[in-house]
Amino acid sequence: MLGKSKMTVVLGIRYLLWYLISIPVTWLVPTRKDRVILASNRGEGLSGNARYLFETWQRDGSFEVWAVVSRKDVYKELSEKYPHVLFAFSWEAIKVSAQAEFFILTHGRLDVPFCGSRKIIIQTWHGIPFKAIGFYSNNKISEKIRNLLYKWFDYDSIDYFLSSSGY
């Protein structure tokens, strides 16, 4: 079994590969204004705001809503319960996400490993009112650099950022 840091690198490479593959597809496939992709927990599951919206919109049909997950066991569990669940590392997920007008996320851009061009990206955040996001709380230079990269990739591409936090 690989250690946690090696698994993080492997998953990062896998996300990068699918992200790069999705770029030309996103530009070639027309978007559908009623299609929404929901994701949370870096794709490891569906929880919080994303899960609530997914279950509500599955019931009332306001949008054609799809959940994206990166774990096969979670995909199997959710796809037995709901019709619109995608395994992140699949061709179907690339096609459906390329057609989506909206990405709604809870943790950051790594919730979905696809190109966000031509998308409206809404970050619902998963914090609580007295929780700082964390960019200002690290003192080590390596943590500051890491946070700057996270900020650039995870948050600068967000169109709308919803949070109850004062930070």
Image: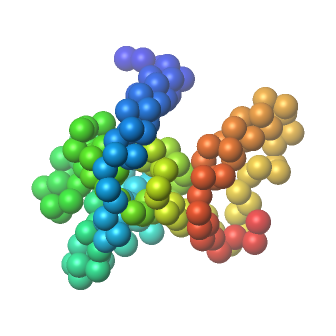
User: Left or right: where does residue 131 sit relative to residue 7?
Assistant: right
Report the side of 151 relative to 92 (left or right). right
Specify whether residue 125 is in view: no
Image x and y of residue 151, in percent: 69, 47
Compared with residue 120, is residue 142 higher up or lower down, i.e. above or below?
Answer: above
Q: Quadrant of residue 89?
A: top left
Residue 56 in view here: yes
Identify the image quadrant of the C terminus: bottom right
**Residue appearing at x 51%, y 23% in the figure:** 9
Residue 85: % across, % down: 23, 55
Q: Residue at x 49, y 19 (%)?
A: 6
For this rendering, which residue is in front, 123 or 46? 123
Residue 117: x and y, percent?
49, 50
Closer to the camera in the image, 135 or 35: 35
Residue at coordinates 28% horizontally, 60% vertically from top-left?
Answer: 66
Q: What's the colour scheme?
A: rainbow
- Picture quarter containing residue 88? top left
Estimate the x, y position of residue 27 in percent, counting from the top left.
40, 46
Position of the N terminus by quadrant = top left
Left or right? Give the position of 115 relative to 134. Answer: left
In depth, the one of 1 and 137 nearer the eye is 137
Residue drawn at (70%, 63%) of the image: 131
